[in-house]
Amino acid sequence: MLSTVLNFAQRVAEISLLGGIEIASVALIVYYVFAKTRAPIIIANLFPNLNLSYRTSLGKINTMRSDLLVTLRSTNEPTVQSSVAHGIGTQNMLELTPHAGYKPFKGYFDWGVIFPYVAQVFRSEKFEYRQVTEIVHNDPALKHAIKQAAEQALREQRYAQNGHRLLTRSVSADQAVDEEDESKGISYHAILRKQEQRAISILKEMGSTLNNGLLAFTSWILYKLLPCFLSGVVTNTKQIEMLKTASERSPGTPLIFVPLHRSHLDYIMVTFILTNNDIRSPLVAAGNNLQIPVFGGLLRGLGAFFIKRKIDPVEGKKDVLYRAALHLYLTHALKQGHNVEFFIEGGRTRTGKPCMPKGGILSVIVNAFMDGSIPDALLVPVSVNYERLVDGNFVREQKGEKKIPESFKKAISGIWKALNSKYGRMRIDFNEPYSIRELVNSFNQIAREDGNAKIYKPAARLLQHNQSTSSLYGTDVVCEEHRNLIESISRQVVFDCAAATSVMSTNALAFLLLTRYRQGAEEQLLAEALDELRNSLSGCKDIGFAGESSHVLEYACELLGTGLVTRTRNENGRMFIRAVDSVESFIELAYYSNALAPHFALSSILMTTFHSLLAETPDAAAVSRKKLIEASLENCQIYRYEFILNKPTQVLEHLLEKNLDDLLFRDYLRLPEEDKDIPFEDIRKARKLAQHLDLDDDDDHLSGDNNENDDDDGGPQLLYSSETLQQQRNICEVLAPFACTYLTVAQALQILHRNSMLESEFINFVIYELSAKVKRGSCIYAESISTDSVRNCLKLLEKWSVIEVCNQQGMRLISLNTLYEMSRESLNTIVKKIGAIVPKLNDGYFRINNP
């Protein structure tokens, strides 16, 4: 009996010892993770309303990491971040829990007060999210597409076996043909079964599994983790109310959210905001490169439906079955009442400015309206911006290096890095929705107008719709009117999104450093420039920050980090801010600066064109207004694939006139002395009235122009103002990096003389040339090294018929057009034409050194 008790005690002691060792090991690991990461902040966010006693002791134990515990300790000293508030009328969505806390007719003991985030996700409105995969699979249109795909595959196999001899034979040929096919191992029924299985596989890979349970759980997780690396997710509550009102007024009308794409976090956060404000979460079009383990399934449950980034794997051959599946999936999703979200740019912007739109998914939605599948749809442009991009940067890709594909390991490392970093605020703006029905009616009205009017015209006749269930936008069966309509709507969406994108603190700082103070400046001087910038943007763009400019600059420098911006004291003891002098830092800073480039693009084109015209005639002291507008219109065409400068319904010439008036008002240009007798504000109002009445400036006194000052070219003379030369240069430098890239591409065309190259090789050659120019100082803009701008320039040259692009076995070959192939000299005209957009920064009156 005693031995049994002793044995039992011995075993208990052994187990206790082993258990103690294991517990100690686990404790050490947990403490190491706790000490080396932002785990304290994460734990604090998990229990926001509980005053845990362990926090103080943890701060004492982990004194070496006290900076990570700053949010856990109370302090009377205001931090830099707290002094930089977000814009007026906005709300931090991470602090907004409309379904939690105190409620009318509920007492103090409401459990939502203690667990606000649990209450928020539990009490949010739940919607019925119907699955559409099975509906699509039973659709007769899909079965017809399966048959078409089988017939296409059969013809290809026959052609491979017999060449052209049997290429034209149909599936319903006589029995002799069938027997000949079987003897060669060709079976139509086997091919048909294979296409049926492929259709099932496509729908399985594509289909979303959006559900309320995962939405609620993910919302709770985001409420806890987002504050670890974001100081806020800011939007305007009035915009949320606007969306609710639109949904309530038209309950059967789907909302189509169309954000500009900056980060993988975009679609998650749009869904997060909508879910927690009782708006139906959308199905989100996502690239199939995001189908990675764990995260792919998570995104699918949050509404993602995956589509191939390249629908047609073989150039010149359309994947009929895949196109039909995608077309039908979207159409049935809309008919079932789903909201939809897609990125009209296709992928994330690599330059920080909007990309040219792609109209594939938009075409399907417009099709669904035009063939009566849905009564209408409301397009909601969404503007997204970050103070610091969570996804890192795109410097590698801009320098011509290959993109690192998404993977589980990359996703985990990205999340780990995010939890240990600070990214400031994220800003999301939901712009006013517009009806597809009204857009179609508007463009039809334009199509009816007189052809002499200088406005966008989709077609000479009313829009007609040729229904196609197996095709997306860009196929042969889509009529030209429909193609023009899709392009017009998509360009308007991108234009509106860019115009409504809020300016963040890092955007403003990067813009000032790259366009005004490339060599750096004292903080006080930069603060004055920031005040000036904020005043110029007031009423035009929303400012996503508030506070004293000196605090804003300090805050922005902290966010961007010492790898991009340095903030040190100079020999005078004053704070000096400058960009880090490296190619990589300038490329990354350009990403933030380019958020403002579209706003100043027209002014930059006008100012650059003005000085270019003066440089052409050194003896001339002025340029006529008419000549400047005409030359600027030509230069705007050079940027046609870089910027969307106007809406399709706007007249570009009128916008140039307006921007020219603003330059005159700011004294960047001057009128002759005798013209100054007329108040300039009256001239602006008169010209605006003349444009509204469709009057010619030269034909009516309302324009405010004195005819005696008109030269032979027409229009008043415009003089440059010597007092504002530095400001003029600053405006020119907004687009100067793009102009330098384009000029280098034009100069590199000489290498294509009697020689064709792979497009990728030519792009690498241009990037090498740009890098060499930057290194030797002949190009002062390191951010000109941009593969995106090189590709945009190649599109322009192809549009001008300077180069030809052909596809051979999936590779793009470029060569010179016959006209330019005959003589190298003919390329000089292209170089000269593009050279007109390069600022003449070193010519005479423009020799100014940056402070």
Image (cartoon, rainbow, N blue to C red):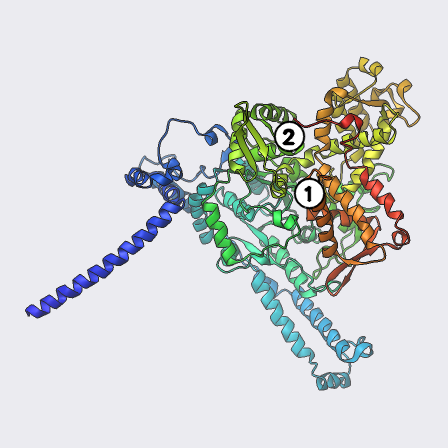
Quarter of the N terminus within the rendering: bottom left
Q: Nearer the viewer, residue 35 or 843?
A: 843
Characterize the local packing of mark 1: few (<14), some (14-19) or many (20 or more) Cα atoms within 10 angstroms.
Answer: few
**Image vertical order of residue 577 relative to residue 249, above or below:** above
Type of amino acid under label 1: Lys
Type of amino acid under label 2: Tyr
Tell me if label 2 and label 1 are in contact, CB under 8 Å.
no
Name the residue tied to disc 1. Answer: 775
Measured as percent of width and height from the top left, residue 712 is found at: 93, 26
Question: For this view, does 31 lie left or right of residue 306?
Answer: left
**Image vertical order of residue 178 relative to residue 784, above or below:** below
**Image vertical order of residue 247 relative to residue 503, above or below:** below
At a point 79% along the width and 41% down the height, the residue shown is 638
**Image vertical order of residue 135 relative to residue 365, above or below:** below
Q: Nearer the viewer, residue 482 or 667?
A: 667
State the SS at label 2.
loop
Residue 517 is tagged as 2
At a point 73% along the width and 86% down the height, the residue shown is 179
Quarter of the C terminus within the rendering: top right
Sequence order check, earlier mark of 2 and 1: 2
Q: Nearer the viewer, residue 731 or 685?
A: 731
At a point 69% along the width and 50% down the height, the residue shown is 358
Residue 486, visible in the rendered structure? no
Residue 296 is tagged as none
Quadrant of the rendered image containing residue 625 = top right
Question: For this view, does 532 lie left or right of residue 603?
Answer: left
Measured as percent of width and height from the top left, residue 203 is found at: 59, 63
Q: Nearer the viewer, residue 179 or 530?
A: 530
Residue 157, visible in the rendered structure? yes
Measured as percent of width and height from the top left, residue 193 is found at: 63, 75
